[in-house]
Image: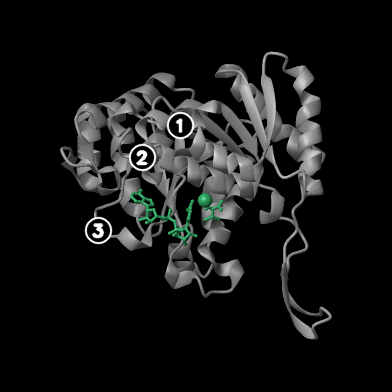
Amino acid sequence: MKICVLPGDGIGPEIMAQALRVLRALDLDFSFEEALLGGCAVDATGDPFPEATRRLALESDAVLLGAVGGPQWDTLPREQRPERGLLGIRKTLGLFANLRPAILYPELANASTLKPEVVAGLDILIVRELTGDIYFGQPRGIELRDTGNGNERVGYNTMIYSESEIRRIAKVAYEAAQKRNGRLCSVDKMNVLECTQLWRDIVSDMARDYPDVQLSHMLVDNAAMQLVRNPKQFDVMVTGNMFGDILSDEASMLTGSIGMLPSASLDANNKGLYEPSHGSAPDIAGQDKANPLATILSAAMMLRYTFAQEDAAQRIENAVKTVLAQGYRTGDIYEPGTTLVGTRGMGDAVLAAL
Ligand code: NAD
Ligand code: IPM
Ligand code: MN
């Protein structure tokens, strides 16, 4: 099992170190090879996604990523920014299906900013399309145009989905719903955007192939509201790249903290990139404060989806449940009466539980 390890920037290296300790403790036949992605790669090579990283990622069975980005790189030309590296590796590996499960561990019911009864028992899966939409659509840019108000700068992007792109992500979502509670909610903005009208038409057409799945549709603004009003109405949600980005951060707070939300980004053959849903958290980087559980849980998703090691995946997930039950908390999920630990301390606790 050849794993490409990309610690990245900010808290990336700190949380990755803990995930690697956990994986090594499983005593499975892994080989880990590290490479540069993001700001660290820009500093070393001038390119956020260097050729050596591209080659290693392509020849590995899976990629494990910390996070990329930070304010020191925000003024670079767009093609040199760390985030371009992340988008580049997703596109290069064809990782069109981003699975972001939001599960509330019972011990964290009070860590959520929502009332415990609203979030207790929460278990939803957001299926986000990851290689299309306004993130990649052409044309895009900032340029001078005569707008009727004289010559001025305009900024523009293109929201675009092809039928085949919609079909393949909808298939992933329908199949996920079949394995879960059989309910799928497709989120769009078809009242305004043609692109998402096509999305709704195709997802609806496909429903006849999945008679065991109960399909519903929701406009994205309502979905954002329903996620905080009554999140337990959802089982699987499927949506495009940008709406999925926003809704998954929103869903993360239902679970107590964005530091708890793992993710898997998969191609058609379950080759995958695994990363926490959060970013590089520059505000707490280098302080041993970051919650490593989202990264550790992403490693569990890697064992499940790419390597079909369900037992090992569950061992990690059970160890996480154990440390939460034992009362260990990083700052983002801390509440009085629990034991405050740092990034490394949380890694120690997970190892002990394993
Ligand atoms: P962020 O997710 O990095 O941080 C948002 C807030 O959540 C911060 O207050 C941060 O301290 C906190 N937080 C995030 N992860 C945490 C963890 N594991 N434990 C405890 N607290 C945590 O989002 P941002 O501040 O908008 O972005 C910072 C940088 O990260 C930007 O450069 C952005 O582009 C990048 N980013 C990268 C990824 C990725 O690599 N997948 C994802 C999102 C943002
Ligand atoms: C995420 C991040 C990325 C995205 C950024 C950093 C490019 O926010 O993984 O959710 O928007 O996809
Ligand atoms: Mn995001």
**219 to 8, vertically: above or below:** above
**158 to 123, vertically: above or below:** below
**Pointer 1 or 3: first along the chain:** 3
Question: How far is disc 1 from disc 3 in space, using C-alphas?
Answer: 27 Å
Image point (66%, 47%), residue name: 131
Residue 106 badge: none
- Whether residues under marks 2 and 1 lie with C-beta atoms below 8 angstroms apart, the answer is no
Q: Is residue 264 visible?
A: no
**Pointer 2 or 3: first along the chain:** 2
Depth check: give the residue in front, 353 or 157: 157
Quadrant position of residue 119? top left
Q: Position of residue 258 (x, y in %)?
A: 40, 45
Q: Dot 2 corresponds to which residue?
A: 112
Q: Nearer the viewer, mark 2 or mark 3?
A: 2
Q: Secondary structure at mark 3?
A: loop
- Indicate left or right for 44 with 79 as reference: left
Question: How far is disc 2 from disc 1 in space, using C-alphas?
Answer: 23 Å
Three-letter code, disc 3:
Gln
Q: Dot 3 corresponds to which residue?
A: 287
Q: Residues within 10 Å of mark 2 (few under 14, many from 20)?
A: some
Q: Secondary structure at mark 1?
A: helix
Q: Nearer the viewer, mark 1 or mark 3?
A: 3
- Indicate left or right for 249 with 294 as reference: right
Image point (77%, 49%), residue name: 192
Three-letter code, disc 1:
Met
**Pointer 2 or 1: first along the chain:** 2
Q: Position of residue 27 (x, y in %)?
A: 30, 28
